[in-house]
Image (cartoon, rainbow, N blue to C red):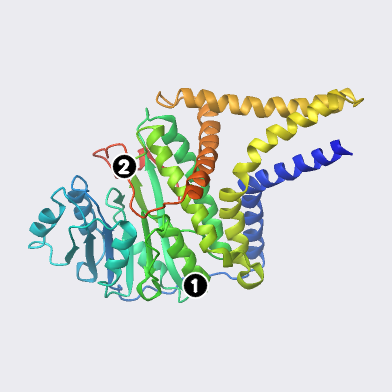
Amino acid sequence: MLLSVIIILFWVLMALVVYTYLGYGLVLYTLVKLRRILNIGQRTMPPAGEAAEVTIVVPAYNEIDCLPAKLQNCLAQNYPADRLHLLFVIEGSTDGSAEWLEAQKANVPNLTMLSGTRRLGKIEAMNNAMQQVRTPLVIFTDANTTLNLEAVSRLVRKFDGPNVGAVTGEKRIQMELAEAATGSGEGLYWKYESFLKRLDAELHTIVGAAGELFAIRTALYEPVEADTLLDDFMISLRIAARGFRVEYEPEAYALERPSPSIREEQKRKVRIATGGFQSIKRLAALLNIVRYGWLSFQYVSHRVLRWAVTPFCLPLLVFVNGLIVMQLLLSDASSLMLAFWSLLLVGQVFFYGLAYVGYRNEDKQTRWKPAFVPFYFVFMNTCVLLGLVRYWQGGISGIWEKAARVTQPADSLSPTSTQHIG
């Protein structure tokens, strides 16, 4: 009887893991295919009208090394210059950002700057910036990313749909051939994320914007709590909760370099995981599938399970599998049954062994994908567990120490060195 209960528990845990990382994608793909066949909810984009006025908001704390390139990148956008406004928010910066931007205003009439002596954090910077925005659309982008030249026009174009409240672009990781394993794993993970976002958008709405590049209708912006860690996620999900769709435009993208080390990447992932638990609490109403329908289904399947359930299932799977093998050894179970469960246990141990090999080689050239893919998978889920610990400890602040990134190469728009990550 005890053995049967343990076996059922194992398969429940396994089902949750498989559904989270593979099953949801298959269900999503099937639903989208059925909608296409039945011609349900097919969207047609109306003809493009006059270019809407849009403000690009760039929060930039002590980013003087990035500001010249970011300003030029914004000015180079293939969008009518008289319809494009730039707002850099540099409150608290002590590296000369204010002086440099002030000097540029003589040659850039559409440039505005918000500065001050007190460091408020990104969330407060965005809240303050939105009080200054007078255009119907606003685009948020990070100072250390490079946008493709069609980014603004492609994001704005998506708003031709009347019930579209926000549009997210795609984040892409730009790597050299000899990057660390963490960068390679990050890119592969986000390629799958990009695939899921395409399907999410076609089914109903995506569940979470890319903070590196996303746009919203200005009128839909709600001030975000000052201690919010995932501002992009909270802003976009609250818009979706009000009945608007969050669209996805993969051809509007922001290029970003990978973390230079696993330690820097861990900082970023733990913070994201901590913000995930914070968001789940604040968006608890979205768990009501009766009220929110498809949005709840997508939110739970794509986010809640990945943040709050599956990372805890993985170590339990090994433990429960070990219990089953021990119970079988102490009973009169058939050799075939013992072999089956033993192979499952060995397979799990082998997987984590590969992850350890990837960990040991994360600062070396990434030539063996079977090692760094398991490594990045285990690394992500470990960061979730660490994020829960941090969330429990409290003291969360919207101000944080930035995780470093590899220096941006000169050929930053070269598609040959990027990973599409959604």
Residue 188 seen in this snapshot: yes
Residue 151 seen in this snapshot: no
- The numbered mark at residue 244 is 1
Of marks 1 and 2, which one's residue comes earlier in the chain? 1
Measured as percent of width and height from the top left, residue 407 is found at: 27, 37
- 170 sits to left or right of 88: right
**64 shown above or below 325:** below
- 64 sits to left or right of 309: left
Marks 1 and 2, how far apart at CA: 35 Å
Which quadrant of the structure image shows residue 420? Answer: top left
Question: Callout 1: 10 Å neighbours few (<14), some, many (20+)?
Answer: some
Which quadrant of the structure image shows residue 323? Answer: top right
Q: Looking at this view, name the residue that lies furthest to the right.
A: 332
- What residue does disc 2 label? 414
| Mark 2 element type | loop
User: Camera-side residue: 130 or 35?
Assistant: 130
Q: Amino acid at mark 2?
A: Ser
Whether pointer 1 and pointer 2 mark residues with C-beta atoms closer than 8 Å, the reply is no
User: Camera-side residue: 65 or 74?
Assistant: 65
Q: Amino acid at mark 1?
A: Phe
Mark 1 or 2: in front is: 1
- Quadrant where the image shows the N terminus: top right
Measured as percent of width and height from the top left, residue 240 is found at: 50, 68
Measured as percent of width and height from the top left, residue 367 is found at: 46, 24
Measured as percent of width and height from the top left, residue 297 is found at: 63, 61
User: Camera-side residue: 79 or 373?
Assistant: 373
| Mark 1 element type | loop
Q: How many marks?
A: 2
